[in-house]
Amino acid sequence: MKHSPDRLFARPLAEVPDFTFNEDVARVFPDMIKRSVPGYPTIVENIGVLAAQFAQPGTRLYDLGCSLGAVSQALRRHVKSEGCRVIAVDNSPAMLERCREYLHAQDAMFQELLPVETVEADILALELAPASLVAMNFTLQFIPPERRQELLGRIRQALLPGGALILSEKLRFTDTEEQALLGDLHVAFKRANGYSELEIAQKRSAIEKVMLPDSLEEHRERLQAAGFRKVVPWFQCLNFASLIALP
Ligand code: GEK
């Protein structure tokens, strides 16, 4: 499938609008996320590997905030349990339209993939049915902070015994030196991936009000308050991490 290089913030903008998942973003998203999130390809592929350990026959696997469906595709590559189906949810029509195209392309290339249902919905309003796996790959950070606890509580209630939540997030750090070091290294990562100082600065100002990261401690506490008994970080690259939370 054809996607364009991310040049969204390459020209000086008179005013930088808040970041939204619109058609322009959907068009460049695969390039944008790979060049912006350290470890993204490894995380996505391994969510499939991890999910295969938790998926139970005949159950649902949720991909919440699926964007173009990278995680859904990984789930379909790795999960072999009989009768599973993937539910890919996003509230951006532009993202979901392209997501469906990518999933059709995957269907055309491989046989016997798990079925996927794409759902255009706000995950805060979505009724979650029982599931053996829920993946939220860099989605919770876009949910208003005051709604995060309630959402995780509902995910916990939906998870079947033996299932898991896989939660990936950008982290913030309470230690100022650690925050500054990993922040600087993240900027170095973006520079090394070809983003200019202007692109980095404009993207930061577009996203700073809509993407609000928590610390690892906040995630742990919130997950435990939601009823998860075990929280295990399985991946960290700079200030981006992924956790397994067990019901
Ligand atoms: C990936 N998981 O490629 N309801 C539904 N979707 C939402 C909501 C909401 N309330 N809020 C935000 N989104 C993907 C990457 S991107 C992360 C996830 C990023 C959606 C939003 O439309 C977007 O598609 C996604 O969450 C976040 O593995 O861009 O850094």
Image (spheres, helix red, strand yellow):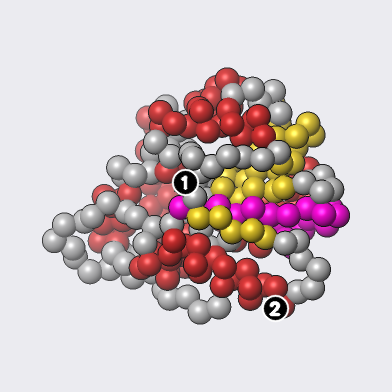
Write the residue at 58% across / 71% down.
102
Q: Is mark 1 within 8 Å of ligand 1?
A: yes
| Closer to us: 12 or 58 | 58
| Closer to us: 29 or 238 | 29
Specify the quadrant that holds the C terminus: top right
Q: Is residue 118 left or right of residue 33?
A: right
227 lies above or below 31:
above
Specify the quadrant that holds the N terminus: bottom right
Q: Secondary structure at mark 2?
A: helix
Q: Is residue 228 left or right of residue 66?
A: right
Where is residue 122 drawn, in percent x and y? 47, 46
Viewer-nearest of discs 2 and 1? 1
Where is residue 216 drawn, in percent x and y? 52, 30
- Tag 1: residue type? Asp
User: Crowding near pointer 1: few (<14 within 10 Å), some, many (20+)?
Assistant: some
Task: Provide the residue designation for mark 1.
Answer: 122
241 lies above or below 246:
below
**Closer to the N terminus: mark 2 or mark 1?**
2
Residue 10, picture quadrant = bottom left
Task: Provide the residue designation for mark 2.
Answer: 108
Magenta residues (range):
74-91
Write the residue at 44% across / 61% down.
93
Query: Are dots 2 and 1 in contact, CB under 8 Å?
Result: no
